[in-house]
Each structure stands twice: as C-alpha cells, then as structure tokens.
Amino acid sequence: MQSVKNTVLSSVDKHREELVEFLRKVISIPSVTGQEGEVQAYIADYLRDRLGLRVDVWEPSLEELSKHPGYVPVDRGYEGRPNVVGVYNGAGGGRSLLFNGHVDVIPVGDESSWRHHPWRSEVKQGCVYGRGASDMKSGLAAYTFALLSVVEAGLKPRGDVILEYTVDEELSGNGTLAAILRGYRADAGISGETSSMNIQPACIGRIWFEIEVRGTPVGVQRKWEGVNAIHKGYKLVQAVDDFEQIRLSEVRHPLYPDIREAIPCLVGVFEAGSYPSAFPDRCLLKGSLATVPNEDSDQVKTRLKEHIQAVASTDPWLRSHPPVLRFKG
C-alpha cells in the first residue's frame, strides 16, 4: 500500500505545473452565476481530451427540478448553463467514488478594490489569486488532477470515479440536485469545497429570505407627512444583525469550534427608491442565514420570524404596517 501511495504522490508532483496551469485557466474564464457556459465547455473538452473520460454535458431542467422538495426557486433557467460530469470506469469489483464541486462564482464588485485582478489568475509567492481561486476552482483542479495522476501512474481503480462540475451553487445548489436526478450516485462522495485542509463529514445549510417594508412616499418639500421606508428598513437590517448575535450565543457544534464560521446571518441586498429627492414607498431586504448540521431549518425560520415581529412591535409604524418576511429557499 505504501508503494502505491508513493507512486501516486510522485505522479502528483510530476503534474504540478500542469495542475497550476489548469487552475489558472479556469479562474481566467469568468463564470459568475448565470454565466457558466464557457468554463463548462473548457472543462468538458479537457476531461475528454486529456483524461479520456466519458463526459456527460446537459442543461438542468427547471420543470424536473421544481418537482423535488430539495429544489430552490431561482429567477432564471439553465439554457446555456450545463452541468458537466466525467466518468472513469473502473476495472470492476470495487466501490465507486464521486467528487463534487461547482464552477460558478459570486460577482467581483469593483475590480479596482482587488489587490490582484479577479480574472488574471496571478501567481504570487506560491499562491494563485483570482475570483474563485478558493471557492472553489482550486477544489475542482485538485480532484481533476487526483484522478489524472492516478491514471497516468498506471493504476486502475476497481470502482468507478465520477467527477462533477455543477452550476448555480452560489444561489441554489440546483446543479448538484440535477446531477442526483440524472442518476449520479456513488458509494462515497467528497466535496472539493475549502475546509482549511480538515476533513468535514457534514456541512452547513443556508436559508435565503426577503423582508419587504412599506413606507409612505412623499416629496422632499413635505417630508414630514411621509414615512421613509429606508429608515424602517434599516431597523430591520439591525434586527438581522442582532439575530445573528443571539444565535452565536446559543448554537454550538463540535465540527465548528469557531461558531462564527458556521452561522453567518446578514442582509446583502437593500433595494429602495428611484428618485433622490423623495421617500420611497417600499424597501426590499435580501439576505441569508446559515444552519449547522442536524439543526431544524423550520425552527430557525420560526425564530427569525418571531424576532422580526418583536422588533417591528417596538416601532409604531411597523407595528401597524408589519414587514413581510418571505423565505426563498
């Protein structure tokens, strides 16, 4: 067994530069959620041409996904946004192993605020920088080259090895659900997400929510007659922050000694107004909160709802015009 391990590690070292170039290439192809098509085409070709895998490329079906209880509603479909799965057929008689990861990344925001350009995949002091380098194109590269290194070392696993490259993880996780519905299962699975090189046998969940707040629109000349939905919305941004603090004081999990990493709760989008000299009639907050393994998501939703209601009850306007909390997944 030690000789096999040494053979594989030697093969990994041999392909180090090629691995780095593969990683730099997939980072350099922008793949913000909704724009995954180009990087998926590159990966599919690489799996066919370099690894000789049987490659499956398909666009997830919203109609099929929406029938599953694990589906998260999304605002766009999957035309031009395919999943890619590469399959290595083992020699037979062994257990199968599945690697899972996603190609989509979050938006870069203001590029001038980056120390390293988000799409140039720069290498500095042994590290590769760029949007998606950590989350999670390094993971994709790692398991792609783990298989390549094994195969090129002349070894043939007995079980099948499945490599998944999914879309739409950042907003929903529907890409992985689509792969499951397509029939990709294995005896064991490994996610390539970052974990500080620690084995994580479980992962956090995420709840997406919106809070709609109403005001009374009025022009600046009569502002005392109106109610600024922005002011009321800000109270609820603070309420969400306070809810996170409550959870930090209550929730514990052995896999997350620093519980702050496990249960972030925030408002990331604040939409209000269309004219700089008038109160808007509404504002819309969009946010998310995380749950630890085995935590009841419905109970967490109920706690958030009760917390928002309690905060609203302290404000005369919000008490008579209660905010509307909606869960989006």
Image (spheres, helix red, strand yellow):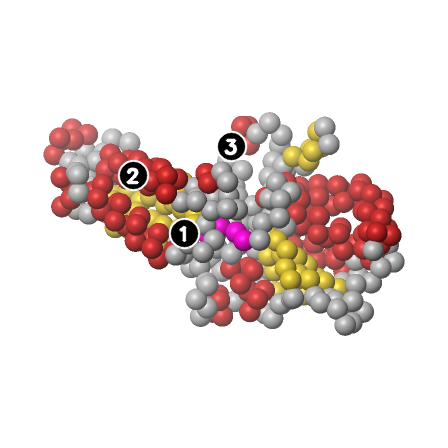
Residue that carries the numbered disc 1 in the rendered image: 207
- Establish if 38 lies above or below 246: below
Q: In the image, which is nearer the foreground, mark 3 or mark 2? A: 2
Q: Quarter of the image containing the N terminus?
A: bottom right
User: Does any portion of residue 29 appear in the rendered image?
Assistant: no
Residue 216: % across, % down = 17, 40
Residue 20: % across, % down = 75, 41
Residue that carries the numbered disc 2 in the rendered image: 239
**First of labels 1, 2 by sequence position:** 1
- Residue at point 29% right, 39% down? 239
Q: In the image, which is nearer the foreground, mark 1 or mark 3? A: 1
Residue that carries the numbered disc 3 in the rendered image: 110
Q: The disc labelled 1 sits on which kind of residue?
A: Ile
Q: The disc labelled 2 sits on which kind of residue?
A: Ala
Q: The disc labelled 3 sits on which kind of residue?
A: Asp
Residue 92: % across, % down = 78, 72
Q: Hey, which residue is sitting farthest left in the picture?
A: 225
- Residue at point 30% right, 50% down? 303
- Residue at point 70% right, 52% down? 143
| Side of 3 relative to 253 (left or right) | right
- Secondary structure state at the residue bearing disc 2: helix
Residue 271: % across, % down = 34, 41
Q: Which residues are magenta?
A: 202-207
**Number of other residues with Cα within 10 Å of mark 1, as a class: few under 14, some 14 to 19, many 20 or more:** some
- Secondary structure state at the residue bearing disc 3: loop
Q: CA distance from mark 3 to mark 2?
A: 28 Å
